[in-house]
Amino acid sequence: MKKSTINIFRMHGWRVDRAIHNYIYFVFYEQYVRTFLASGRYLMKILGPGRINSLAFKNIFENYHAKVLTPGDARKILSLDHDMSMDAGRAKRIIPFSAANKIIFNEPDFIAVMDCPCRLSRKVHCEPVNVCMAVGRTTAEFWLDHCAQYHVRKITQAQALELLEESARLNRVITAWLKTETGGRTGVICSCCSCCCGGIEGMKLARRLPGDVKVTNMISSGYSVKVDTEACTSCGACVDVCAFDASRKADGGSPLYDWEACLGCGVCTAGCPSGARKLVRDIRKGDPLDVGRPAG
């Protein structure tokens, strides 16, 4: 057994079932995600947006979810020069799920990147594909040992930052993914688009569920958008790039901002030609995953 596999089992401790699931999840990454998405679509088709699906989706999302990152917060993660482990109380404020909410970065300068399973699962997908990053030795080394079929490669922090900048130019949403079966911790950073990302598709499926049950798998960066209505030229650029349908055109052509739907990714603010939009810290959206921010 490879050392990286042993480390996965050590990470999970007595939960051998989760370690095995961890192994299967990444070794068969594309097939796993493809099956997972198909199951969600099937559940919604057969059972519809009722109470049973609400409970099913809620249970799944408690164990598998993502934190949206601003480009600035993502840069801090990819530039970490020391190990980091947030206390459980602070981590829970940032990632308010009952499971998979550990914020741990061990050897954060050990980074691997491989093909995105969401993009691979689509008949027609966005480019580039090689964008999923594992930050930290435990997961990254496992990828390097077991995921050659997904064109895995070790990269430097400088190269990771270059990938991040390219994603920003392409209007991608930067996300940190957590899953109980992969240790319940941060470490997988991806750049997502609404046309390929299975997580965004799952979030939109969940929006069809009854309104009295709050179900989501993607949570806000901790920021929202402030719109300068006088500077806005109603060009519609924000509408074109928003992955969460938080910017829509009104009947008169002016963009409408939906605070509830906005997850604070910053894509619309970066792409606003008139500078009419900016990200602002919003305590109603929870705490940001800002590794440079003091506790408290």
Image (cartoon, grey):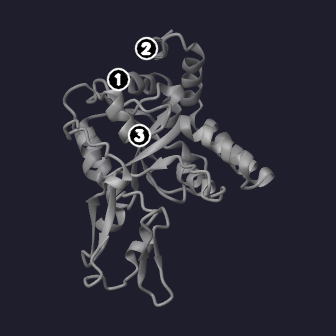
Q: Sequence order check: which comes first, mark 1 or mark 3?
A: 3
Residue 58 position, x and y percent, is 61, 42
Q: Residue at x 19, y 30 (%)?
A: 81
Say whether residue 38 is visible: no
**Quarter of the figure with residue 39:** top right
| Real-space CA distance between mark 2 and mark 3, rounded to the nearest whole angstrom | 25 Å
| Real-space CA distance between mark 1 and mark 2, rounded to the nearest whole angstrom | 10 Å
Residue 208 position, x and y percent, is 65, 59
Front label number (1 vs 3): 3
Secondary-structure class at tag 2:
helix
Q: Amino acid at mark 2?
A: Asn
Q: Which residue is mark 2?
A: 7
Q: Which residue is mark 3?
A: 95
Q: Is residue 200 positioned above or below 136 on the image?
A: below
Q: Quadrant of the C terminus?
A: top left
Q: Amino acid at mark 3?
A: Ile
Q: Amino acid at mark 1?
A: Arg
Q: Residue at x 27, y 76 (%)?
A: 276
